[in-house]
Amino acid sequence: MDGRGDLRGGGRMERYGWAACAAGALAFAAVAGPVPHRVWGVCAAVGYGLAALCASRAVAVLGAVAVPLAVLVVGGLGQSEVGVVERSGALLLATGSPYAADPATVADYNPYLPGMALFGLLPGDARWWMGLVFAGTLVAAVALLGSPERGGFASAQGAAARSSAALLVGCPLVALPLAVGGVDLPVVGLLCLGLALAGQGRSDWAGVAVGMACALKWTAWPALPVLLALIVVRQGRREAIRYAGVAVAVAGAAVAPVALADPAGFSAHVIAFPLGLTTAVSPAASPLPGHLLAAHVPGGSVAAVALLAVAALLVSVSLAVRPPHSVRAAADRLALGLGLAMALMPATRFGYLVYPLALWALPRCLPARESADRLASPVRREVA
């Protein structure tokens, strides 16, 4: 990364970066509790070390993602989220609902929206499919932003897109959940693709991408108003209404049938459990401000939720008062909103920070000269 914020910069600084990642991965392996995390740390330390020697992003991705993922899958090791997704797929196939009827322990709960169960229906380990969706949508998003042609995967811009995506995929905050089983990654990838499509003026397809993300996890829903504000500014109200209609229709087609067929299960798993209203308590407890308030301050849970509501209100007001005029501005606004949400939620994980990281990095995957031309200039606004 050079001083201009270009994520495509290589050379000596990139070698130093991979060397730092190697040291961090080795330290992580030494202190991590879960076995899958320790396995990833050892494999990634070797991969990042080799990447530092040859300044190769491909080697970093191979060593920090592909090798530990293969080792963990063969060994049957992974985060609990993988089992939750695969069990939800089996339940959906057997009962028509991805939610267990009488959840009693944390392992019985499925806090994800119904669309996530589709990864559990596919053959093999769910991590392969979640990783493929993330990588595919990320490469597509960077290629769309980097090329004035529609696509450009085989062009020079397409090669730069793949290289830029490899840099982000090789980042430890992304590589770790890819290997051990991070359900947030396909959500992040779809949000990035939605932003890129909105920037290209393809409001319908942006609605499809964001709607699919919203069918997977609640964490995608803040993207709906951010992209709506962007499309209003760049294309006008008519296109914004089309985008919103498509996004709501896609998300509703996945969520509504299950919510209507199994309202008790949907409410218990997707609403009550994440809010801490069940006897089983979510294990998400990284020492971020929201959790520290909830755990150590009397009435801290209420205070954390209140701060979360204030942050959401401020971001919403900012969209009305100063709507984003570019993809970069929209990505930064969404990254800020989600970053505040992840920090203030009473039950949160450090892994959730992949949202603001990927969204901040997405528009910066282009050289500065391309970013100025293609990300900052609004498309012609239609007459609504």
Image (cartoon, rainbow, N blue to C red):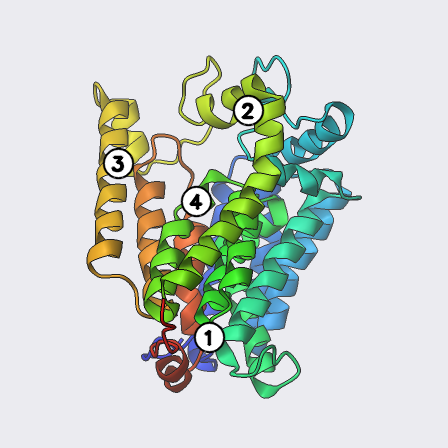
Compared to residue 177, the image places residue 170 above or below, namely below
Picture disc at residue 266: 2
Q: Position of residue 273 (x, y in %)?
A: 47, 23
For disc 1, the marked residue is 14
Q: Where is residue 252 in the image (x, y as percent from the top left)?
A: 55, 40
- Tell us which disc is closer to us: 1 or 3: 3
Task: Please indicate, yes or no, whether residue 267 appears anywhere in the rendered image.
Answer: yes
Say which element carries label 2: helix
Q: How far apart are marks 2 and 4 (CA)?
A: 17 Å
For disc 3, the marked residue is 309
Please state which amino acid type lies under the numbered disc 1. Answer: Glu
Please state which amino acid type lies under the numbered disc 4. Answer: Trp
Residue at image position (49%, 47%) is: 28
Say whether residue 287 is left or right of residue 91: left
Q: In front here: 42 or 349?
A: 349
Say whether residue 224 is left or right of residue 36: left
Please state which amino acid type lies under the numbered disc 3. Answer: Ala
Q: Quadrant of residue 4?
A: bottom left
Picture disc at residue 221: 4
Q: Are marks 1 and 3 in contact (CB under 8 Å)?
A: no
Quadrant where the C terminus sits is: bottom left
Q: Where is residue 7 in the image (x, y as percent from the top left)?
A: 43, 74
